Image: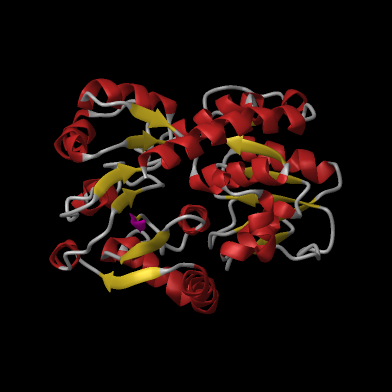
Amino acid sequence: MDVKIITIHAMHNPGSVFQAFALQKYLSAEHEVKIIDYRPLYFYSEGSKLKLFIKKLLWGRTYRSRNKKFISFVERYMNLTARYETFDALNSAALTADVFLTGSDQLWNTDFPCGNDEAFYLSFAKCGKKISYSTSVGKKLIDENNLTILKRYLPSFKAISVREKSTSEQLKDAVGKDVAWVCDPVLLLPMSSYARFLSKENPIGKKYAVVYLLGASEKLNQVVAHYKSNGLYIVLAGGFTRRCECDRHIKDVGPEDFLNLIYHAEVVISSSFHATAFCHIFHKDFITFLPKTNGERIESLLQESSLENRSISAADDFDIDQIEQPINWSLVDNRLECYIKRSKDFLEKEL
């Protein structure tokens, strides 16, 4: 079967590229799969033009190094269509497929440009079945603007699945269709599928805690100080400014760097959904700071794995000793096995 996926696959964000890689790889076992190489200009927006200018001025070599790693990853590991940089170009291409699939990632979050882009609601698809897989609105309560757009486009879908449980419940009532709750694509693949990206050698050369995708806060300082006092080297991964005390700041983190830093770490401290997901895959100790907004996707995963105690919210106090209770990975794997099977069953049924 000819399947074409549209997603955020080429943004310079490790989670985005790995969810795209994973979905294509999983489906390619039984189908002919291509990712639609849709790259609107907003994919490469990194805040204000002034901030981007300063970033390039101060960290130009590091900035280019990071970008090259992402470009190389996409070229090596993704099977792409021709490139389209505007919706009009994509719509005029009159692509054909047996199935057009949108997902995963926060494609339907109207707080971001992609959530207001009709391409990710498959309006360009003139033939074939329309399906969403693990698409996210990124928030616990869907606002009216978001809901209006979803009601406009989703009735034409053959099947709908989303990444958050609360979204599934709200959309079912709103669009009058069953809406499945499924896992992120990175969880569809076994750990062995990521082995090609992992080095045998510890990239830091000593035991370390890695901090990823977090803003500065007193709670972060407390957690970092705790692991520092326990003898761990502190590695800050990604970003161009130092957001906590650390022994080393690696700014040019590419996709493979991201996986290796998680895989070899003693503990992963992040606010990232995909960092948290890979901690589940690699059986890594972790602490996840729940974002003030868009944290529903992380909460859904932690509820499914019964590891809610591994999260810290902005509003609540935390007890590091309670968070550090040993994880029974056998129990976690058993719980996730049911979750993943349900997700695979959805794809098998609807494709």
Q: Nearer the viewer, residue 86 or 338?
A: 338
x, y percent for residue 243: 58, 51
- Identify the residue at image location x=37%, y=48%: 103
- Identify the residue at image location x=31%, y=43%: 131
- Identify the residue at image location x=74%, y=58%: 247
Q: Nearer the viewer, residue 62 or 325?
A: 325
**Magenta region, mostly helix, strand or loop?**
strand
- Whether residue 245 appears in this view of the structure is no
Q: Nearer the viewer, residue 35 or 273?
A: 35
Name the image quarter holding residue 41: bottom left
Question: Magenta stretch: residue 131 in it?
Answer: no
- Whether residue 153 appears in this view of the structure is yes
Q: Is residue 74 above or below residue 286?
A: below
Q: Is residue 9 above or below residue 227?
A: below
Q: Is residue 262 left or right of residue 242?
A: right
x, y percent for residue 293: 41, 34
Q: Residue furthest bottom?
A: 61
Name the image quarter holding residue 176: top left
- Identify the residue at image location x=53%, y=42%: 273
Location of the C terminus by quadrant is: top left
Q: Is residue 252 left or right of residue 148?
A: right
For the record, the magenta segment spans: 1-5
